[in-house]
Amino acid sequence: MTSDFEAAWREREIVARRPDERGLFVALAPMDGVTDWVYRQLLTDLHGGDSGISLCVSEFVRVTHRQVVDRVLLRHCPELTQGGKTRAGVPVFVQILGGDAEPMAATARRAAELGAPGIDINFGCPAKTVNRHDGGATILKCPARVESLTAAVRKAVPEGVAVTVKIRLGWSDAAAVEDIARAAERGGADWLTIHARTRLQLYRPPVDWPALGRARAAISIPVVANGDVDSIPALRACAQASGCAAFMVGRGAMGRPRLFRQLRGHPDPEFDLAWLGELLRQYVVRLTDSGAPPRAALGRLKQWLRLGAPALPELRDLFDATKRICDLDAALDLLSGLPAAPLAKPAVVSPP
Ligand SMILES: Cc1cc2nc3c(=O)[nH]c(=O)nc-3n(C[C@H](O)[C@H](O)[C@H](O)COP(=O)(O)O)c2cc1C
């Protein structure tokens, strides 16, 4: 365990807004089709806004050959109209994805003008259509492009606006992760988030946390560790294997929405399936209130249950139970009827 992590862990009750700030930094990962503003607001509002989440990142905004218009930026990140923060005050970075420096820079500049506190560049998306159109993880094949695209965005936005980069370990293996990390640093990234898998791996095991440590040793900007950090023991194991002291959590938040707060040492005695059912019900209601058609809201609910199941096995049964449900009201009834039986207790928080 490195001293960086020990220091962050000792002060984990302090919500660091950047990985180089005092306290523990734990960001909510961007997930296209999941972490829209409704989801971001729901999670950051937990515990009266004391959710423990350091930072949110928007779903990716695809930048092709021209600057993205305001309407699209505001659709992805309506928080821009409220100072680039969620209602509870958690900053939201706008994530952009593309391979053309000029429109990416122009889009980043405009997002900053609209109030984005930071711009995150997505070089990790594994989707075939995205990669075929020169976006996401395909850029990792050429570290020089990581550098030039990052530099173009850095140059376009004011100094006070953070520019961050999110990558995977590489396209087919992790051999070039140090080169890619150095490229992001040379391009002027404030920090680098790494999902500890390759593009070809998609989401399959194993997650390679030690490779994060190699990247970390190659650069002096912070590395934010991402990939399967879905519990307190997992975070500690990741820190141990990588030396990282800052983290990003995606799917784990769907199984354990209070994980961010638990990580900060708050016990969570009331956590049970009925509580989660009520949260999911609120999610669905807020989605439909914001204009989502019932079918889409039902799809989102099923997706939440499916993606959250690895972190919370009870969600697997719930997912199976909703599989054949086509009616949103029936799904809401199911959520309302969940038992208030306690779930497996979250792991005890002990010092490193
Ligand atoms: C459904 C889904 C959508 C995702 N969309 C994005 C995205 O828009 N931008 C991005 O950088 N990563 C995206 N990711 C990757 C996550 O941010 C994260 O890197 C990955 O899920 C590993 O972290 P986890 O194990 O904590 O979930 C997505 C992942 C999933 C499962």
Image (tube, rainbow, N blue to C red):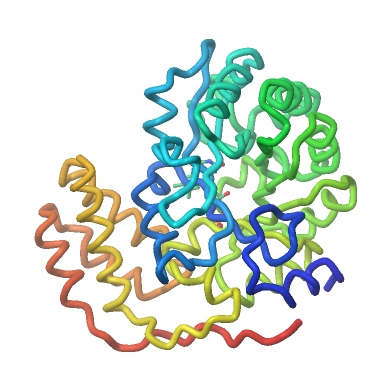
Along the line of sight, the residue nearer the viewer: 165 or 157: 157
Along the line of sight, the residue nearer the viewer: 232 or 136: 232
Residue occupying image coordinates x 29% and y 50%: 300
- Give how far across and how far down residue 68 sits, in percent: 48, 18
Looking at the image, residue 211 sits to the left or right of residue 275; the answer is right
Q: Can you say whether 263 is above or below 204 in the image?
A: below
**What number of labels is visible?**
0
Looking at the image, residue 71 sits to the left or right of residue 68; the answer is left
Looking at the image, residue 47 sits to the left or right of residue 338; the answer is right
Looking at the image, residue 133 sits to the left or right of residue 350; the answer is left
Q: Can you say whether 1 is above or below 161 in the image?
A: below
Q: Can you say whether 331 is above or below 192 in the image?
A: below
Q: Quadrant of residue 192?
A: top right
Residue occupying image coordinates x 37% and y 32%: 75
Residue occupying image coordinates x 79% and y 60%: 210
- Give how far across and how far down residue 21 sits, in percent: 74, 57
Picture quarter with the C terminus: bottom right
Picture quarter with the N terminus: bottom right
Q: Can you say whether 255 is above or below 133 in the image?
A: below
Residue occupying image coordinates x 13% and y 55%: 328
- Give how far across and how far down residue 258 sits, in percent: 46, 71
Q: Quadrant of residue 231?
A: bottom right
- Give how far across and how far down residue 345 sits, in percent: 47, 87
